[in-house]
Image (tube, helix red, strand yellow):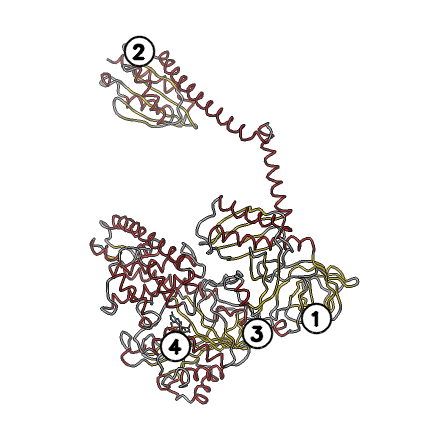
Amino acid sequence: MKQMTGNEIRDLFIEFFKEKDHMVEPSAPLVPIDDDSLLWINSGVATLKKYFDGRIIPDNPRIVNAQKSIRTNDIENVGFTARHHTFFEMLGNFSIGDYFKKESITLAWEFLTSENWMGFDESLLYITIHPEDTDAFNIWREDIGLSEDRIIRIEGNFWDIGEGPCGPNSEIFYDRGPDYEYDAPDEEMYPGGENERYLEIWNLVFSEFNHNSDGTYTPLPKKNIDTGMGLERIASIVQNVPTNFDTDLFMPLLQKIEEVSGKNYGENDQQDAAFKVISDHVRTVSFAVADGALPSNEGRGYVLRRLLRRAVRFSKELGVKDAFMFSLVDTVADIMKGFYPNVEEKSDFIKEVVRKEEERFLSTLDEGIRIYESIKASVKDTTGVITGEEAFKLYDTYGFPYELTKEYAENDGLRVDDEGFREEMKKQRERARSARKAGESMQVQSETLSNFTEPSTFTGYESMHEEAELLLIVKDDQALDSYDGEETVELIFDKTPFYAVSGGQTADTGVIKNGTSELRVEAVYKGPNNQNVHIARLVNGAVEAGASYSLSVDEDKRRFIVKNHSATHLMHQALKDTIGEHANQAGSLVEAERLRFDFSHLNPLTEEEIRTIEDAVNEKIYEGLDVQISEMPIEDAKEKGAMALFGEKYGDVVRVVDMEEYSVELCGGIHVVNTADIGLFKIIAETGIGAGIRRIEAVTSKYALEYYKQKERQLQEVASALKVKEDNIARKISQLYDERTELKQEIKDLKSASAKDKLTDLKDVKHEVGDVELIATEVSAKNAKELRAVMDDVKSANQDAVIALGSVSDGKVALVVTVPKDLTDRFKAGDIMKGMAERVGGKGGGRPDMAQGGGTEPHNLTIALQFVNDYITTALKRV
Ligand code: ATP
Ligand code: MG
């Protein structure tokens, strides 16, 4: 076997399949494009779904790629097996309706065993197949010549992710020898078992059935091949090292971690696990951020947050205290830059994101300790056990490492329900798995459109009308000669001025006519073979294949769509100039009435940034830039500095939209001739739509003017409500504010004056019963607290009196009574209160000198107050 670096192996794989007439598909970004069903690109096939389910027919049915992938379901394995990562590269060859089982097996075998390529020792390779896949068995047995004992039948070898293509698979294993039998039980010691000796290197999937939405399986019209081989695993074999982490794809990272931590890799297992986890996770995070994801509390962002936290937690094992992960980003960039330059290009941004997140977590750890303390307080004197649920919540919600929970608990003499915790972890993994499975399905192939290859020319750049021949009518996946029903049909013409939805620009709508027949075009999309497919509904007559029609786009609508599209380009540039190059387009929608633009950015835009962007775009509208559109080789476009859409795939010749070099973008859309045609540009909203993704909505031309007019009307309404001229609104408002402040002060003064008055009033109600001074009256107070405050005032002015106050608010009565200290041996406040409260249907009590109470019968308050008088009179008589 030849010695090779990871990069050389990747190249060799691609080279091999290029030689076998495969076209190279570039590695797609980890964040799926136009595919909400998937959190991350997790395999080579994930980016090729559009070919697999027949939505698009590739230029060449044989494809090879090296695809970066993220798998979060393997996260708990990382650091503890030799072969699992959260980020890894999958090398794959694919056949879209071209070769099938036999060729795919032969190709794989040749690549692995031929001296010209990998040159693996044949006797170390083992195969698994699906038990019923006799084709695969015969190929391995007869064509390749493997003995039966090296072909293992495994029930689970059937690749099925719900609706869409599926089929049996066959995996290739490499025997790493008896030295690798550690840790695994005997019953797992076979190719396909959970062990490190028989290493799964390559999975060949024979996709031959359609899994239909009703759960049935039918043969696929076009059978596909999908294979995946882990680059890191192959490298570990080629370089004859014990784990993926000991390959040149990781070693520089491990050395950098040694440098930062002062600890050595290879000293003991526990420390080594930390080295592995940290190096794995920093690769994942660096690549994910480079591809537009950012840490947050949900979805993709949450995965990044968890990975970073897990790495930081393992760094404690190495005695690292401060943020340090960010300092590894440059090493990741350096190892990978040959094939993946974008990590290096964005390294400053990545480092900032990682450092902020680390620092944030280090302070979260403090929070975790607080939560732990409160759990401890509640169980310490009761069960003495921290439940699995509590430990899991600490881990999952607060990012507090389980090991730390255990450590703390041990110190505090508590037990942690280990089994319960594991149970929760298992549930979490199941949730993740079912979410993954549910989301991966594809669409069912449409055979009619896939097989229809006659070209259709788009003439809509120059014109909005066209006379064209109707080539195809499709209804329910059947080609029809004619149709006269009420539902929509799909139509393909030999040429068309109708723009199909793409690049964010919405499709044209319009009319198709011929004699007395008329159809309304409701939507247009690009079919699998690149023709524009019109979804249309009859208004009159019938539609017939082979007939000629005149096609007319809704002109007015198109005109405004075009303005908004050009404005989008200007804004994209202005945005980058204002907030930075990282503001990549993450989504775009161009309609007639408005435009919407999503981009990656951590913080909301400030008012000032929004104004700067708006001004810059309008400036370019006033300047009247000519819009030059030309086709050129992609190399030339790159040289011109054309902005390419991140992750989009372009052909060799591209269409470049150039606005006098201010904005240069690759784009297939339709644009104004001169930016002056846009008229006016106005941003009307800026919001966040997810982790690190912001959205701007804007309007142009007539719609911008309408927006301003509406604002003007609002201003007029305000002016007329204020009864001033518009120019004087601000002055009027500040005048009203001043008045308001004065009035408030006046009210305050009046209130305190009237409160004083009331106290004087109370003097009037004070009377003597025998030798006792008594005040018993209703006052106004909102609640018991206010009533006590009134009592304080009254008392301070009437030290020697027995005072009983009552107030009514919200249908409730509040009562308070005080008796001067030197009278308490004669009358007790508590006794007085009892009698009072009883009379208002409530309760009360307190000390001899002060008692409180209340009731629910306001109409009896007078009686209650009268009672005080009677009580004292009676008491005096008794003496
Ligand atoms: P395993 O059973 O070893 O976890 P798998 O069955 O999940 O692997 P596939 O989905 O068949 O793997 O992926 C194809 C290939 O990608 C595997 O043969 C392996 O070489 C590689 N691979 C899969 N998962 C990982 C991972 N987490 N880290 C590194 N390589 C992986
Ligand atoms: Mg497997």
- Mark 4 closeness class: few <14, some 14–19, many ≥20 residues within 10 Å: some
Q: Which mark is residue 201?
A: 4
Residue position for label 1: 471
**Which of disc 4 and disc 2 is earlier in sequence?**
4
SS at circle 2:
strand
Q: Which mark is residue 769?
A: 2
Residue at the location (65% across, 66% down)?
Answer: 533
Residue 504 locus on image (x, y percent)? 57, 58
Query: In the image, what residue type sits under mark 1?
Result: Leu
Residues at marks 3 and 4, CA–CA distance in whole angstroms: 29 Å
Residue position for label 3: 59
Query: In the image, what residue type sits under mark 3?
Result: Asp
> Mark 1 or mark 2, which is nearer to you?
1
- Mark 1 closeness class: few <14, some 14–19, many ≥20 residues within 10 Å: many
> Mark 2 or mark 4, which is nearer to you?
4
Query: In the image, what residue type sits under mark 4?
Result: Ile
Residue 330 locus on image (x, y percent)? 36, 62
Q: Which mark is residue 686?
A: none
